[in-house]
Image (cartoon, rainbow, N blue to C red):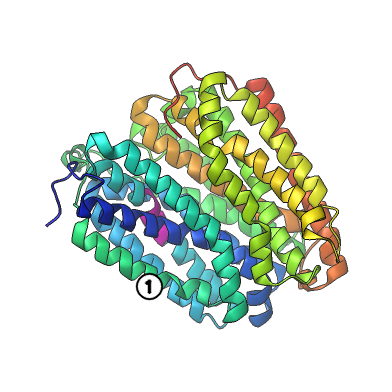
Amino acid sequence: MPEPTSNLRLRSTAGRGTLAAAVLASGMVFLDSTVVNVALPHLGGDLDASVAGLQWTVNGYLLTLAAFVLLGGALGDRFGRRRVFLLGVVSFTAASVLCGLALRIDWLVAARFLQGAGGALLTPGSLALLQASFHPDDRAKTIGAWSGLSGVSTALGPFIGGWLIDALSWRWIFFLNVPMAVLVAVATLRWVPESRDENASRKQGTRQFDVAGALLGALALAGVTYALVDAPGRGLHSPAVVAAALAGVAAAVAFVFLERRRGDTAMLPVGLFHSRLFSVLNLFTVLVYAALGGFTFFIAVYLQNVLGWSALLTGLALLPMTFLLLVGSPVTGALSTRIGPRLPLTVGPVLAAVGLLMLREIEPGASYWRQVLPGVALFGAGLTLVVAPLTASVLAAVEDRFAGVASGFNNAASRVGGLLAVAALPLLVGLSGTGYEQPAELTNAYRGALLWCAGLLLAGAFIAAVLVHRPTRRPLPA
């Protein structure tokens, strides 16, 4: 039997089993957030997909994950974190199987929407289980181990995914989730104790879940995304594009009014935005992660369809970026605690922008060591200066009682940035139809997209230099 809630020790069998369940589950979500970009040229060719189909393959997942992640955390608090976590594992895995079996691009996109919804139940639960289950003396070490091991799984994702794509098929990047999910389910049922927020249970009659807020947020994102993705094919003045854009904007306005009316019981409490620093940091997050999302979408397709690299080599090409993040983030987090976040959040995006401008010039026949690696390394170094200081500053910018929802909202903001970039950049650079299969057209689009991404990073650096200051409260560990 598992030990009582909040009494697990990291060195115990149950403690190691609980940590393994959380790490493997997070690894599935992180893997499917990154490796799909490497598979885009292959699944696009197999399913005869247009650029819009590739966009929706990425954005369908990001949309539901970003829209429902806060609701997923609230459901775990109310109905039991282990129960909702398991529900997320099962639904995410079932959707992964549907992705792997897809025979048409619309089938794959629909399954990706479902996969993102499962991830929204799973993602907040993995960390909440550790926080609620372990003895206070072991929590910091456990969360540190979770962060490091999850980072390793993220780093290995493009490598493993690239090998599976070349050796078997792009479908196996989804089927890989099945054995991982079995291990997660066994470990969870065997060792993870159930926990819930008893205050949420007592308030069942007076505090309802903000389902309406979550649905309005999803509708706002879906409307704007649909308009951006379909505009190149249908035209900016198409009734469908205009209607989708108006519906998205109307839903966003309704979301703001609803959350203001609900106050601190809302999915997104307005009390968070009493902190100007919190608002600024989330705008910064959208800009930086939009650049990251746009870059990773275009670079994977460009390396394979223009430079002729394999999926495995493409995954390996980006590995130094993840390695720098994994190794350097603890150092930059400690540095930010000593000197404040302004300097890292200003210098980091500038370095990343220079890296993108270097990568913008690579051509067929380019040497990886001389022309690709320096840009990837500089981009990764810039992100390393940003990630940990940003997370710690977001948590320090609000009261402790808002720490969970502040972290969740910042996570959602990062995904929204990537979502909007993948939706908007092909429109801005004139890539549509099957243009990603034409080297000349894709080259022009790639160079234009990286120029836009560099501009987003420089805009973030300007905001950090002018508006970011040291939080008045001591930053929590990132």
Q: Is residue 155 visible?
A: yes
Q: Is residue 411 left or right of residue 165?
A: left
Main SS class of the magenta portion in the image: helix
Point out residue 388 in the picture as x, y percentages from the top left corner. Answer: 53, 36
Against 349, residue 184 (above or below) is: below
Point out residue 307 in the picture as x, y percentages from the top left corner. Answer: 80, 68
Point out residue 337 in the picture as x, y percentages from the top left corner. Answer: 51, 23
Which residue appears at 86% of the width and 61% of the height? 363
Q: Is residue 239 visible?
A: no
Magenta stretch encompasses residue 81: no
Against 37, residue 71 (above or below) is: above
Magenta stretch encompasses residue 122: yes
Point out residue 384 in the picture as x, y percentages from the top left corner. Answer: 60, 39
- Highlighted magenta segment, given as a residue range: 118-124
Q: Quick one: label 1, few (<14), some, or many (20+) residues within 10 Å?
A: few
Quadrant for the N terminus in the image: bottom left
Q: Is residue 399 left or right of residue 131?
A: right
Q: Which residue is mark 1?
A: 179
Which residue appears at 47% of the width and 23% of the height? 274
In the image, 424 versus 31, the foreground residue is 31
- Amino acid type, callout 1: Pro
Which residue appears at 73% of the width and 54% of the height? 425
Which residue appears at 57% of the width and 81% of the height? 168
